[in-house]
Amino acid sequence: RRKRPPRWNFARILPLSQRWLNARKRDMDLYRLIKDDNKRVTDLFKQIAVTSDRAGKTRQRLFERIRDEIGAQIEAKGKHFYRVLARNADLKDAVLITRRDHRKIRAELAEIATIPPNTRAFLDKVKALQKRVRLHLREEEQGLFPVAKRILDKAETKKIAERMQAFRERRHPELAATASTASATRRAARKATSKGARKTTAKAAAKTAGKTATARKAASKGAAPKQAAPKRRATGSKT
């Protein structure tokens, strides 16, 4: 009996994208969100660091993206993440130091904006800022995050992540769209890498299993032991 083709419920299929976005919000991880933002800034610094003095327009475009990304992150984290951490007595000093670093980074960004992008001085200032930002992000991820994980529970971090994302989409919609595209690209790359690694592992395991099976088959047959050839008697000529 021929099977009937399935009936597609388009009322359920159409809002799939919205349901996917809602699922992403439910599963949103605060620390992964901040690390993705940090990774994006780090990648932009790497791109601008290899430009030449003749690529003034490219430098200007990359610098504007760095300035906008850092500004949006400082604003979102300061308003929703660090404000919550500052309520804890053990983290007040750490939050003050972080806010001080943010002010210094903003000041350096403002200084770089006054330098022509097609000069060596511009690139030197950008590289100095890159070192400061790299150190700041390392201290944030390795020093502040472990303490925050002990203080904030999962429900609190989820709320903070949702507020930060909503704030970013409301105040900086163009950056939020770029961030979503970059995050999706990284997830696809990680998935492809993981899939390729699994395939390689499976092939190696199958190859090893094949060799083992062949060896067992040969051992089960039991090759007859080789007998030593009989020694031939030496025949000397009688004189």
Image (cartoon, rainbow, N blue to C red):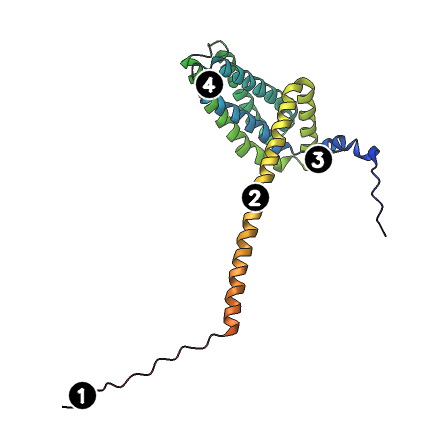
Q: Position of residue 111 (x, y in %)?
A: 49, 12
- The amino acid type of the residue labelled 2 equals Gly
Q: Position of residue 44 (x, y in %)?
A: 52, 23
What is the distance, in whole Å, between disc 3 and disc 4 at their CAs? 38 Å
- The amino acid type of the residue labelled 4 equals Val
Specify which label sits upstream in the sequence, 4 or 2. Answer: 4
Q: Which residue is mark 1?
A: 237
Tell me where residue 64 sits by quadrant.
top right
**Residue 138 or 220: which is nearer the viewer?**
220
Q: Which residue is mark 2?
A: 196
Q: Position of residue 219 (x, y in %)?
A: 50, 71
Q: Which of labels 3 and 4 is toward the front?
A: 4
Q: Which residue is mark 4?
A: 126
Specify which label sits upstream in the sequence, 1 or 4. Answer: 4
Dot 4 and dot 2 residues touching (CB under 8 Å): no
Badge 1: residue crowd in 10 Å (few <14, some 14–19, many ≥20): few
What is the distance, in whole Å, between disc 1 and disc 4 at their CAs? 100 Å
What's the residue at 63%, 35% (across, down)? 151
What is the distance, in whole Å, between disc 4 and disc 2 at their CAs? 37 Å
Specify which label sits upstream in the sequence, 1 or 3. Answer: 3
**Residue 189 or 70: which is nearer the viewer?**
189
Disc 1 element:
loop
Q: Which residue is mark 3?
A: 155
Dot 3 and dot 4 residues touching (CB under 8 Å): no
| Residue 13 visible in image | yes
Badge 2: residue crowd in 10 Å (few <14, some 14–19, many ≥20): few
Q: Which of labels 4 and 2 is toward the front?
A: 2
- The amino acid type of the residue labelled 3 equals Ala
Disc 2 element:
helix
